[in-house]
Amino acid sequence: MPRAGLTPAAVVREAAVLADEVGYDRLTLAALAGRLGVALPSLYKHVKGVDDLHRKLAVLATAEIATELTAAAAGRAGDDALRAVATAYRGYARRHPGRYPAIQRAPDPADPEHVAAAERAVGAIYAILRGYDLTGDAAVDATRMFRAAVHGFITLEAAGGFGLPRDVDRSFDQMVAALDTAFRGWRS
Amino acid sequence: MPRAGLTPAAVVREAAVLADEVGYDRLTLAALAGRLGVALPSLYKHVKGVDDLHRKLAVLATAEIATELTAAAAGRAGDDALRAVATAYRGYARRHPGRYPAIQRAPDPADPEHVAAAERAVGAIYAILRGYDLTGDAAVDATRMFRAAVHGFITLEAAGGFGLPRDVDRSFDQMVAALDTAFRGWRS
DNA sequence: CCAAGAAGCTAATACCATTAGCTTCTACCG
DNA sequence: CGGTAGAAGCTAATGGTATTAGCTTCTTGG
């Protein structure tokens, strides 16, 4: 009987694929084990349990989105960068509907990899705000607003919370334009 | 052996209390039955299952928050109303951390009570935007932005997503002020 | 007053996660 | 080249959850 040759990384990668297919809440150790051609308890050699799997998936997804946000911001400034990063943010959530909710989990301060990924993601947003002359507390507040607005839009959209026929893409564009207006006219 | 005298409404009310105590994701039929002094399967006389319970809880919470948002908006206009409704929104989420996530569930179009509650909640926000001379598509877009920003802020805050020491209440006030700026300068 | 329906119960089934303890492969070292 | 230790897999058992079936008992309306 040949071994499956699993590693923690391979398990988490497959978990990410599975989550995108069936949804984050239906990511189950049983389904994951079946997918990997292995009995369920065998997964415990690679992850400590379902909570640990969620944690590892959060690290993976946070690192992925951080890279995409950073790439989107590269070579752009001002409202151009704002639009690019907001679009990349929403794009990641749409391409990876199962990974995206995992990102919500706050990093354990004792996990340097997770903390670094989260800082990289937030840093990509924070950097944009220099183009609006926002620094210090104002930049922190504006970053929080950006994250809240984009994340909130993504989750409401995913939940089917926008009932009216008005085009959702257009609403998103309008929101990003309004964020630009807000950041230009920021008053501390 | 005396009857517990349950009704669907009583079951959902207790579910709301329990959810606020232990969290929405730990709202379980087993715990709910124990709380009501009844065996687990007995709950099926009042709710069809856990999904139905979630649906009913969504109706309850949506109606509650709609009432609070409407009350907050009453007698106010412009940025005054904006601040009041945003504060009421966040206040509800903080007072009812277990009910709040239930609201995310989109109403079944075939459920008039749920649809009406959702329309009442969105209507309270929509009404504010008349004070900014926003109507039609612009009002829809602005309403979506308001909901996205406030909801996103609430969920990020609840998830512990704001790591930095900067005061979160102040960030929220700044965001509401920035929404005011955005709505004043709205460009279609 | 009694019959029907509602409200409760127990028992059984089916997932899922977790732990314990066993077997077998593999890789490294003498 | 052989043996051994550890890693990777397995089965079995336990406990929690939801759901369905079928039974009993209370309550209420005719």
Image (cartoon, coloured by chain):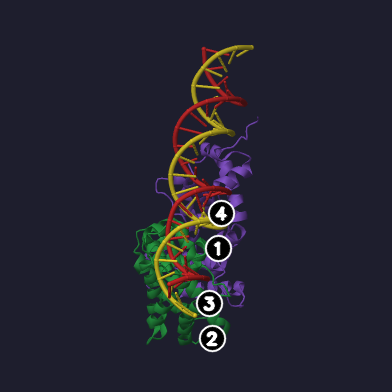
Chain colours: A purple, B green, C red, D yellow
Tell me how far mark 2 sits from mark 1, CA to CA. 29 Å
Q: Label 2 marks which chain's residue? A: B
Question: Which mark lies nearer to you, 4 or 1?
Answer: 4
Q: Which residue is mark 4?
A: A26
Name the mark on residue A85: 1
Residue B121 % position (x, y) = 47, 78
Q: Amino acid at mark 1?
A: Val
Residue C19 % position (x, y) = 44, 37
Tell me how far mark 1 sits from mark 3, CA to CA. 34 Å
Residue for point 46% across, 62% down: B43
Q: Which residue is mark 3?
A: B115
Residue A93 % position (x, y) = 57, 60
Question: Which mark lies nearer to you, 2 or 1?
Answer: 2
**Is C5 situated above or below B36?**
below
Question: Which mark lies nearer to you, 2 or 4?
Answer: 4
Residue A182 shown left or right of residue D22 in the figure: left
Name the mark on residue B135: 2
Residue for point 36% across, 65% down: B168
**Residue A49 seen in render:** yes
Tell me how far mark 2 sits from mark 4, CA to CA. 40 Å
Which badge, 2 or 3, comes first in the chain's sequence?
Answer: 3
**Is B139 situated above or below A54?**
below
